[in-house]
Image (cartoon, rainbow, N blue to C red):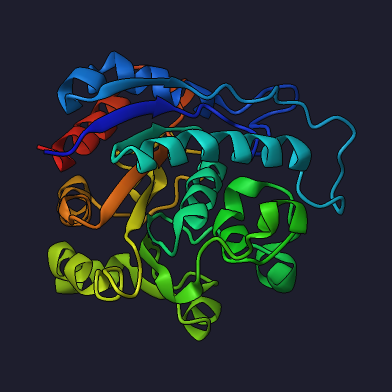
Amino acid sequence: MRSLVLLDAPSNLGLRPPAPGAVPGVYKLAGALREQGLLARLGAREGGVVVPPRYDRGDWKEGDGVFHADALAAYTVTLADRIERHLRAGEFPVVLGGDCSIQLGASLAMRRLGRYGLAAIDGSADFRHPGNEAVNGPVGAAGGEELALATGRGQAGLADLEGRSPYLRDEDVRIFGIRDGDADLPELRAAGIRTATVGEIRDRGAGPVARAALDGLHPPATDGFWVHLDADVLDPSVMPAVDGPDPGGLLPDELAELLGVLVSSPRCVGINVTIYDPDLDPEGRAGALLADLVAGAFA
């Protein structure tokens, strides 16, 4: 039996404001999923909260690099300290975000311990970096850049914390659920990052795709892998409460099968959940679905 620990990382530092003077509501994700009884449903131990710095972009402007960079760097190290402690204790962290930049905390923690992989279930690759600004626009929001940063691309103050760049090797990353025709696909595939689009998952089946992707994420190649779950992988017909609800996403049964295979692997060491915004879900239906999917993966 795994010893699960539920840990909140309610950072919204990696997202742009949804409107002038507003802050992204993803910091409420953890509280919303806990209201769905997730702690008890997982049978998890209480892990507490890693409190993020204040959301304040100050006088940042386009061209200044990643906003909140210093705060994000400090938060990544603090979150990595907590995750590392749980991993060393043989526990399985279930980390509730927050935006996608919290993945850096998990990646840094694993890098301290050895060579680990990442299974990213995400509607987009979050691979924006200075080398592909012609495709993705200028860097700025780390929540759209965390995979690039984790693989050593981008601002050194985030991509090379503790001199450990890259936290993840390209060949140890698997991406599931990005939209067909995503502009980053050519670069990802040229880098050797294995990617399964929604169409490919639908054609081959979520379970077979996940099982095939696990090749190379077992010893001796790696010491294990982490699952990064971004709610925007789901189609907006069932998950509208995200900052970028792009059509053509996975359906709940497809995500459930994918998650089940990945999380049940004995080499999976933890998971984080990101991007669901309760402010965009006044009736709580999308949050209830997300809680069901996370709990169901461990059933």
Give the residue displayed 77% in from the left and 26% down from the top.
56
Query: 121 or 218, which is in the foreground?
Result: 218
* Above or below for 47 versus 243: above
Where residue 155 sits: x, y (%)? Answer: 75, 58
Query: 1 or 127, which is in the foreground?
Result: 1
* Above or below for 74 versus 203: above
In the visual, does 148 lie left or right of 111?
A: right
| Residue 57 visible in image | yes
Where residue 245 sits: x, y (%)? Answer: 45, 45
Query: 246 or 14, which is in the foreground?
Result: 14
Q: Residue furthest right?
A: 59
Query: 101 or 182, which is in the foreground?
Result: 101
| Residue 127 visible in image | no
Give the residue displayed 24% in from the left and 57% down from the top.
267
Q: Residue furthest front?
A: 89
Q: Quadrant of residue 272?
A: top left
In the visual, does 107 lie left or right of 295?
A: right
User: How many numbered badges does the structure rendering display?
Assistant: 0
> The N terminus is located in which quarter?
top left
Q: Quadrant of residue 203?
A: bottom left
Where residue 187 sits: x, y (%)? Answer: 55, 79
Where residue 63 sits: x, y (%)? Answer: 86, 54
> The C terminus is located in which quarter?
top left
Q: Residue furthest bottom?
A: 190
In the visual, does 253 lie left or right of 289?
A: left
* Above or below for 76 versus 183: above
